[in-house]
Image: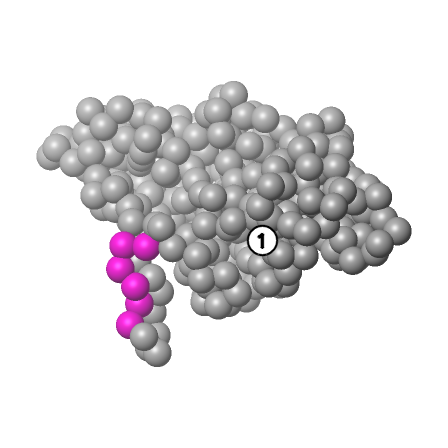
Amino acid sequence: MAKNPERLMVLDTPTLYFRAFFGVPDTIRSPDGMVVNAVRGTVESVSYLINTYKPDRLVACFDADWRPAFRVEAIPSYKAHRVLEEAPAGGAGVDVEEVPDLLSPQVPVIEAALDALGIARAEAPGFEADDVLATLAERWDGRGPVDVVTMDRDLYQLVDDTREIRVLNIGKGVTKLEVVTDQILREKYGITGGEYADFAALRGDPSDGLPGVSGIGEKTAAALISQYKDLAGVRAAAEDPASTLKPAQRKRIAEAAGYLDAAPTVVRVVRDAPVVEHDDRLPREPKDPIMAAMLAEKFGVKTAVARLTRVMAER
């Protein structure tokens, strides 16, 4: 008798804890006065996601390098506005991301709590969490549905109804998340997940330091990709005197040739990143209950940890 397919859930963990930090009051503190709003918010978010979507396997993905060299080499402005301190020239290391002072000390606590509870953590040297999410979704192909939890719209490029890969966008909060499928993308933009990366390259994203093509906004980019199928098709149309492209669009695309040469390297997620091995099976009880209880007590998140422990057991 064939086994039922298992559901994999992959978490864009930096998105979770950043959103928790800005969404939960910083009056949430540990007994010794440390702000723990991101810790509590992240644990509660994971509880909600497990309870609602019932994953069999769960991986919390992290940035080993939030601003990879290969993307910066392609487009130097990539995330440049978020750099607090650059890595030494010619040496090993990564740029230091500007993170709120009250959030930084909470991240190791979140990592320790996940470890104690037995929830897998994964990263890939030299790559972002996005690449880890993409790689795990790619590896899972055919084994069951995949839920990608994030608020980064660039990860819409992973959406694939045929392969049962969807994005759970938590931009409005975990309890108000939007389930994004190819059908939803067609309704919103007239394109599918497979076309999203080229659409995003044309549109650009100021929050990531990607300029896009001047004068081509979201609606125009979507219309162009819908008509010409991909970025190569759009660029070919710009060079074809017989195409129906407007002269202004033709000129803007030609002027953005250098950017458009580089943009796919930055926008497209890597689907074969060297993700560190991990056991992604979601346990029904904490891996280290003593450590979980100690962390819950020390940081004043006993209720949140108890709820997550119960949800893990009851799913």
**277 in relation to 42, above or below:** below
Please indicate whether residue 14 sits to the left or right of residue 57 in the image.
left
Q: Position of residue 225 (x, y in %)?
A: 75, 44
Work out whether residue 163 can be spotted. no
| Residue closer to the observer: 307 or 30 | 30
Residue at left offset 45%, top offset 67% = 69
Please identify the quadrant where the N terminus is shown: top right
Q: Position of residue 219 (x, y in %)?
A: 67, 33
User: According to the image, label 1 marks what residue?
Assistant: 267
Answer few, some or many: residues within 10 Å of disc 1's Cα (few below 14, many 20 plus, some between 14 and 19).
Answer: many
Q: Quadrant of residue 101?
A: top left
Residue at left offset 48%, top offset 68% = 73
Work out whether residue 257 can be spotted. yes
Residue at left offset 73%, top offset 26% = 187
Report the residue that reaches farthest toward the front: 247
Q: Position of residue 152 (x, y in %)?
A: 52, 40
> Which region is colored magenta?
83-88
Report the residue that reaches farthest toward the right: 242
**108 in relation to 22, above or below:** below
Tell me if residue 87 is in the magenta stretch: yes
Q: Position of residue 99 (x, y in %)?
A: 28, 46
Q: Quadrant of residue 85?
A: bottom left
Q: What residue type is disc 1 on?
A: Val
- Numbered disc 1: secondary structure: helix
| Residue closer to the observer: 221 or 257 | 257
**31 in relation to 69, above or below:** above
